Image (tube, rainbow, N blue to C red):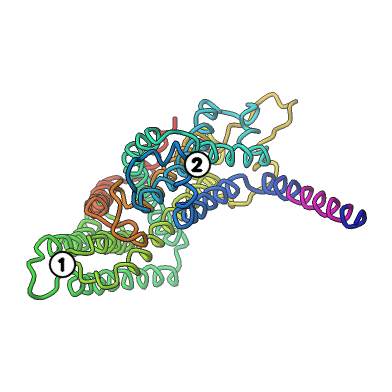
Amino acid sequence: MWCASCLASACAGCTCNLCASALSAISRRSARLAYCGLFAASLVLSFLMRQFATPLLKQIPWINTFDYTQPDEWFQMNAVLRVSLGNFLFFAIFALMMIGVKDQNDRRDAWHHGGWIAKIVVWVVLIVLMFCVPNVVITIYEVLSKFGSGLFLLVQVVMLLDFTNNWNDSWIEKDEQKWEIALLVVTVVCYLSTFAFSGLLFTWFNPSGHDCGLNLFFITMTIILAFAFAIIALHPQVNGSVMPASVISVYCAYLCYTSLSSEPDDYACNGLHRHSKQVSMSALILGMLTTVLSVVYSAVRAGSSTTFLSPPSSPRSGIKNPLLGDDNVEVGKSDSKEIDARPVSYSYTFFHVIFALASMYSAMLLTGWTSAASDSSELMDVGWTTVWVRICTEWATAALYIWTLGKRNTANIGHIVLSLGS
């Protein structure tokens, strides 16, 4: 018995040492990836709490304060919002702490890159504490989340524009015929996908015998925008490239689909209403995937060149760097004897702001952008609010892309976004 207890203690000690070593290794390799992992963990936790936390929340008196029976959906949404609030506060606190960090001699630079055991403890404590606050706090956060989610959607669009233009420029700079053919193939595939998908939308969301003028308007506008992107990009005064236009067209078609598939289950023009549960889950997964890709891309761009997250004074601005760079550069610790401190390679504040806004957006995805309970606990991200949010996002994407076509240097977008974090 004594040997067994000693063995258990030894195993526990080894496990703790292993965890500590792993966290230290993560901080040395890439703090950005660790933040992405923490955000992904919050998404998984939110989904699990939504599915399984209802019985527990019903037993907490300061949450279940009602004299009547609330539907399970209310407790599911409440659990998601509480996890989201804890995650939001974690990144918002770091965003405030990192304001004004200009060089790597600043003590806060080490806070940003290291101390992962303490960070995880703080993250867990914040989420647990959110289950101790009254419902009025969660109601206020829910309202604020709708505005924060709108901001995140705009940042997501800017990231897409940044990605497509850098993708196009990197292939053109190679100045080889095979890359020109690759650009042509990508362009043709994207436009064929856009028009084929739009045809399916006419079939799914314009059933015969029903007046579906609104759906027809949304789909027709998507097709018109796809043609407009190509025409404007090929105009001699614009001198743009048609490949980014084709990628943006596919994204707009995707947004149109997610918008129409989010129409209420009892809406006659929603041709997928018989499969509403599957469509709701697939739309949620796609939404979560794009959210994760956005925050991961922000992490990648933070560690690479250009102006998207890098301050103009950064020596890494305009220089290509890998995501997992040199350990000393990543950790951000410079020799204390250096006279000239190296400037930081990206805005730490804006980096954390993106994660904070993404926390709000993920909560809205899981709650359907509304506090009203759905008819089924399995229907997520469904309702007219979701429909209009996504359609407006599509139109905002189109407007921003057309605006960038009038700019010779697409890096101006990055300067605009960077100003949010400066």
Magenta highlight on residue 10: yes
The segment highlighted magenta reads 6-19
**In the rendering, at what x and y percent does residue 287 appear?**
38, 57
Q: Helix or strand or loop: what does disc 1 sit on?
A: loop
Q: Is residue 360 left or right of residue 12?
A: left
Magenta highlight on residue 398: no
Q: Is residue 405 visible?
A: no
Identify the residue position indicated by label 2 in the image.
87
Vertical position of residue 18 compared to residue 122: above or below: below
How many residues crowd around disc 1 within 10 Å: few (fewer than 14), some, or many (20 or more)? many
Vertical position of residue 342 compared to residue 69: above or below: above
**In the rendering, at what x and y percent does residue 144 appear?**
34, 36
Q: Helix or strand or loop: what does disc 2 sit on?
A: helix
The residue that appears at 70% across and 33% down in the rendered structure is 334
Q: Is residue 362 left or right of residue 310?
A: left
Snapshot quadrant of residue 104: top right
Q: Using the image as rendered, state which of residue 326 and residue 75 is in the foreground.
A: 75
Vertical position of residue 142 compared to residue 48: above or below: above
**In the rendering, at what x and y percent does residue 241 appear?**
31, 59
**In the rendering, at what x and y percent does residue 365 appear?**
36, 52
Identify the residue position indicated by label 1 in the image.
269
The residue that appears at 61% across and 44% down in the rendered structure is 31
Q: Using the image as rendered, state which of residue 293 and residue 383 is in the foreground.
A: 383
Q: Is residue 241 left or right of residue 43?
A: left
- Say what amino acid the circle numbered 2 marks: Asn
Quadrant including the N terminus:
bottom right
Label 2, label 1: how far apart the Cα atoms are:
38 Å
